Image (cartoon, rainbow, N blue to C red):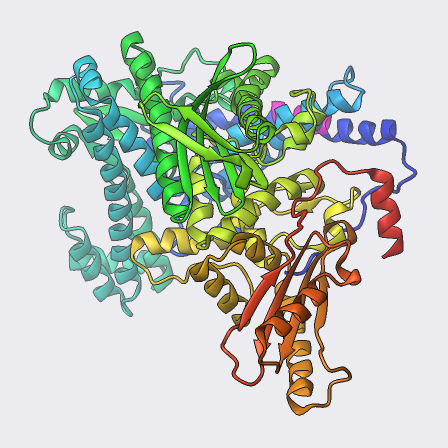
């Protein structure tokens, strides 16, 4: 991966006050333009039939061919939240049945919504004049970031993950939910997911029909194909076809446009479903009236939002809570099928929240579910680890605490704490107190719990016995643990905020140092990380370096952006990591992972993205993973702090030295190669030792001398690869490491030390 540095927009000598004035001017201008343009959206849903208009936008501006991603290619021009806003505006008055077609006005509507969207985003730059300190401005930026995520970011996980979490949680409260609503929740939400797929199937079928018409070379066969495609229509006669051909100026393209406009009237059916079909999918045992009542709870009728404040649609769009429009006669329409799976978990929770007993049951079930999922993922990801769940203990004051999960692998312990709380609507809208409260609960609280448990294990090295609520006693030998990694896990997805703890500190949300906070990762993102990082050492390295990288580097990106970046370089980017005057933009890096996570679930043979390394390094780590000798994880950890480029260079130099040793032309009787990787404060050394001696004691003595070389004194870790040139065993004959290690970097940066070190490079 190549990193490109963009030029500064303003010179260094421009004072902060001037910079803020410029930013506020942009924000003020955007606010004024938004205020003028936004209300004009109403005319589009009143001058045209809103169902027709929404269908046209969904079909022509939102839908795109399978396997393409306009956001990833920079071609996304009409964001989904524009369509959501249009549906909300449509519900503010009775339905208009105006029959005029949009034609070229669709492009005018598109331009209008694009302009509204641009000003809607930029108006947040109007930083209130009362905010002047760095902390106040950082807090404002954090709020606006959450607001931007609420407005525009959709799909909190991959489809297979959203489906699993939704249906698992629905199943956990099945009897109580069914008693309250008369419909089994698992069946109900499975039906909505199936209905979503059927809408996609109808869309594809419609497009196929029109492609078949467009493929015909003369007007007669084109008309015949159109009649065959829509047999429910009154067929176009030969006489009518001749008239249409003449009206089209005897131009095939014009005739096709006429047929397309006529077919557009069918789009309402593409995006609609019937109560009868829903009942059929839910299955036997459900009363039609109960199902209809539940569907009406998540639907609006035209005019229902007549008294709504349209400005509130931006951050609290009611369409996201009730995405369907009840058209009457048991027919339901929606233009937002594309994000329905994203919305369904919130819809489940809204329904649950109406009943206190159901709400209490769901809250308990949700917490247990997160803990169970965490255990499932960790056990699968660390087959050689010791997994301990639910360890309870007391401090000196007699206060009882519980650790959710700790996994011990070799000399490493990863301490997980899980929080299942949801992000409240006020927090999503950026309400300062509620946002701060939510972030403290989801990020600060699990950090405290994890670090408190780590301190307990560190303070008394040896065997600890922890009771659990299950009656099992967890026996953890902290005397064998040298390295601890704290991780907070949530069910909620906090986007860019969760992956950047420095923002919380800068905003004053938490009054802690980086050392006192643990990285926060959603359970679905953790599952994705573990799926791609197949080796245990890779998972450990990612989680350890993830914490350091977050502390050192200024960046924009969420967890999967970080994962995509890690796969390219293992977070090994040299001194750039400590450059406090740089901001690394990794947003959309996760798009590189989408083909695998989406395509593989749809049955396509998509190669799994892997951590970049040479074939030799890959083989070495495979052998390490199989052998599991004492210190195997530390050895693998050291090897992973070398970039693929350095691995290749090391291999070239090693082979050169090996030839000399084999041919007897080396400069000394015993020769080795010392290869240092990383900046000075994070330096790791790999020793290459090609040898011809047969005596193992002599070999080990020389290898020890190479490892303990003065040149390696400042290294955080040293690993040595030995190859017997007489009888080489691929990928190595002997692998060793220096026993004394200091593998983890400190988190807090000393600005003066970093500047001094960078000046020497």
Residue 406 is covered by the magenta coloring: no
Q: Is residue 8 above or below residue 713?
A: above
The magenta stretch is 27-35
**Main SS of the magenta segment?**
helix
Q: Say which quadrant the C terminus sits in.
A: bottom right
Image position, residue 47 (x, y; %) = 42, 29
Residue at image coords 49%, 58%: 629
Front in this rendered view, residue 678 or 139: 678
Q: Is residue 492 above or below residue 265?
A: above
Q: Note whether residue 94 is visible.
A: no
Q: Say which quadrant the N terminus sits in.
A: bottom right
- Which residue ends up furthest to the right in the rendered image? 13
Residue at image coords 38%, 51%: 598
Front in this rendered view, residue 57 or 658: 658
Residue at image coords 74%, 20%: 136
Residue 28 is covered by the magenta coloring: yes
**Within the image, what quadrant is residue 527 found in?**
top left
Image position, residue 52 (x, y; %) = 34, 36
Front in this rendered view, residue 634 or 473: 473
Q: Is residue 366 above or below residue 112?
A: above
């Amino acid at each position: 991966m190549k990193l490109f540095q963009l030029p500064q927009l303003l010179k260094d000598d421009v004072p902060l006050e001037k910079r803020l004035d410029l930013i506020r001017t942009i924000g003020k201008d955007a606010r004024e333009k938004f205020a003028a343009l936004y209300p004009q959206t109403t005319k589009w849903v009143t001058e045209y039939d809103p169902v027709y208009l929404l269908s046209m936008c969904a079909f022509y501006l939102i839908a795109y061919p399978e396997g393409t991603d306009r956001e990833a290619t920079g071609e996304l021009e009409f964001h989904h939240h524009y369509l959501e806003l249009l549906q909300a505006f449509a519900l503010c008055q009775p339905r208009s049945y105006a029959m005029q077609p949009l034609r070229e006005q669709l492009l005018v509507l598109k331009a209008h919504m694009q302009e509204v969207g641009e000003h809607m985003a930029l108006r947040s730059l109007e930083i209130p004049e009362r905010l002047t300190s760095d902390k106040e401005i950082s807090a404002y930026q954090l709020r606006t970031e959450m607001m931007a995520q609420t407005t525009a970011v959709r799909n909190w996980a991959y489809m297979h993950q959203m489906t699993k979490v939704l249906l698992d949680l629905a199943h956990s409260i099945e009897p109580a939910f069914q008693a309250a609503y008369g419909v089994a929740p698992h069946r109900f939400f499975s039906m909505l997911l199936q209905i979503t797929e059927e809408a996609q199937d109808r869309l594809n079928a419609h497009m196929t029909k029109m492609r078949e018409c467009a493929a015909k070379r003369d007007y007669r066969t084109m008309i015949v194909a159109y009649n065959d495609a829509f047999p429910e229509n009154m067929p176009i006669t030969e006489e009518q076809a001749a008239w249409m051909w003449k009206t089209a100026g005897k131009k095939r393209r014009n005739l096709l446009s006429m047929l397309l406009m006529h077919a557009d009237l069918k789009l309402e059916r593409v995006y609609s479903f019937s109560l009868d079909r829903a009942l059929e999918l839910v299955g036997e045992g459900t009363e039609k009236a109960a199902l209809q009542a539940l569907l009406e709870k998540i639907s609006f009728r035209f005019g229902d939002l007549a008294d709504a404040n349209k400005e509130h649609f931006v951050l609290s769009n009611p369409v996201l809570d009730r995405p369907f429009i009840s058209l009457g006669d048991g027919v339901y329409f929606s233009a937002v099928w594309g994000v329905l799976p994203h919305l369904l978990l919130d819809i489940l929770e809204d329904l649950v929240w109406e009943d206190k007993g159901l709400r209490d049951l769901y809250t308990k079930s949700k917490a247990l579910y997160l803990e169970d999922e965490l255990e499932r993922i960790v056990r699968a990801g660390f087959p050689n680890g010791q997994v301990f769940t639910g360890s309870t203990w007391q401090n000196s004051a007699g206060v009882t605490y519980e650790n959710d999960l700790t996994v011990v692998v070799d000399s490493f312990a990863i301490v997980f704490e899980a929080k299942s709380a949801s992000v409240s609507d006020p927090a999503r809208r950026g309400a300062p107190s509620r946002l701060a409260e939510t972030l403290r609960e989801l990020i600060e609280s699990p950090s405290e719990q994890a670090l408190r448990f780590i301190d307990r294990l560190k303070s008394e090295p040896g065997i600890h016995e922890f009771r659990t609520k299950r009656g099992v006693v967890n026996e953890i030998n902290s005397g064998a643990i040298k390295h601890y990694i704290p991780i907070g896990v949530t069910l909620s997805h906090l986007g860019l905020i969760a992956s950047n703890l420095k923002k919380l500190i800068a905003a004053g949300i938490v009054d802690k140092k980086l050392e006192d906070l643990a990285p926060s990762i959603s359970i679905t993102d953790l599952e994705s990380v573990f799926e791609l990082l197949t080796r245990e050492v890779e998972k450990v390295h990612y989680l350890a370096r993830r914490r350091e990288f977050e502390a050192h580097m200024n960046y924009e990106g969420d967890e999967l952006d970080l994962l995509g970046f890690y796969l390219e370089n293992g977070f090994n980017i040299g001194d750039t990591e400590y450059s406090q005057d740089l901001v690394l933009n990794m947003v959309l890096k996760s798009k590189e992972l989408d083909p695998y996570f989406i395509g593989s679930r749809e049955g396509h043979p998509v190669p799994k993205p892997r951590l970049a390394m040479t074939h030799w390094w890959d083989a070495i780590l495979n052998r390490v993973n199989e052998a599991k000798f004492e210190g195997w994880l530390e050895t693998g950890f050291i090897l992973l702090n070398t970039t693929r480029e350095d691995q290749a260079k090391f291999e070239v130099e090693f082979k050169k030295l090996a030839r000399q040793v084999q041919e007897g032309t080396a400069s000394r009787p015993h020769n080795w190669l010392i290869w240092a990787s990383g900046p000075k404060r994070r330096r790791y050394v790999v020793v290459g030792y090609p040898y011809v001696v047969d005596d193992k004691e002599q070999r080990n003595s020389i290898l020890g001398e190479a490892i303990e070389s003065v040149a390696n004194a400042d290294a955080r870790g040293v690993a040595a690869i030995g190859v017997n040139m007489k009888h080489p065993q691929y990928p190595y004959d002997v692998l060793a490491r220096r026993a004394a290690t200091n593998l983890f970097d400190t988190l807090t940066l000393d600005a003066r030390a970093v500047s001094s070190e960078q000046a020497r490079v």
